[in-house]
Image: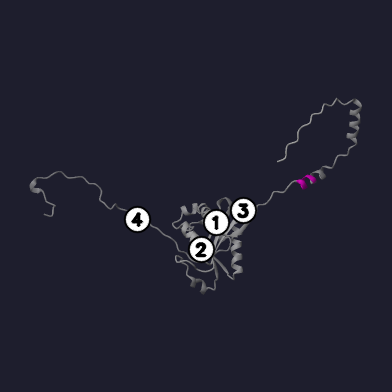
Amino acid sequence: MCAAPRNKRKTASAPSASAKRSAGKKATRATPAPAGKSRKAAAKKAPEPETPLIEVKRIHRRDINRVWEFLKVSFRDVNAETVEYQRPRSKHRFEEIYEEEGIEQLIFEVDGDIVAYAECSYEVTGSDNWINPRYFEKRDMRPLFVDELAVHPNYNGRGVGSFVLEQLHHLARVNGLNHLVLEVAENNERALSWYKKRDFKKLDAAIFMACSVDTEPELLPPRALPPARSDADTESTNGE
């Protein structure tokens, strides 16, 4: 830390009249610098604001906890409106994915903070997968399956999602794949619109449907007890 300079006091006498006149002459002789040049010089000296960089890297084991927390924030609103969770169902399953072969897990960061996450695979994997590989084989489609694509809500509309998609296209090209295939919740209209603008087309649909059912309680409701009858009219309900 640099110490602040101390102010030095000077006890100077008032300038004489001749000193004032000579100072005035010097001032009038001085040629002022053109305004244009001074503005240009100031513009050159003013530092330009740094543009934040977004960088992509593969996930490391030490990133698992913070990526999981990121996913919970990113899919919080979507999960509240869908039957099926749009992110891995549990942290345990997410940790298992890290150990599986053939799955790419990519983190996108700005100044060390996660702003996006992408997970993709080169073939159909997992025992809980409903994808039919023959569908793509018949159509000469060699897909890169995008299992997860998430952008932090604070970074929507800033080109982060486009950069993630560009990275996925690049991965597909360098691996000889000719399609990106992903699943979007049917009622996630914002995501559907975003993908359609980027040439994604609907292949098939597995839609969760529901209809309302008039329910009845399992036990009958209370009812009025009739008045007591005479002994002759009394019927035994016991099994004796």
Q: Of residues 215 and 21, which is closer to you in this image?
A: 21
Tell me the distance, in whole angstroms, between the alpha carbons under discs 3 and 2: 26 Å
Sequence-wise, which precedes: disc 4 or disc 3? 3
Towards the viewer: 98 or 179: 98
Residue at 8% across / 46% down in the picture?
Answer: 231
Indicate left or right for 104 with 12 as reference: left
Residue 99, numbered label: 2
* Contact between labelled residues 2 and 3, with CB atoms less than 8 Å apart: no
Query: Residue 100, percent across and down?
Result: 51, 65
Residue 124 on image: x %, y %: 50, 68
Q: Which residue is mark 1?
A: 62
In the rendered structure, which disc, 2 or 4, sits on the residue that comes first in sequence?
Answer: 2
Q: Is residue 207 left or right of residue 164?
A: left
Viewer can see residue 113: yes
**Residues marked 2 and 4 touching at CB (< 8 Å):** no
> In the rendered structure, which amino acid carries the disc numbered 4?
Val
Secondary structure, magenta segment, majority class: helix
Q: Is residue 65 above or below residue 29?
A: below
- Please name the amino acid that badge 3 sits on: Val
- The magenta segment is 41-45
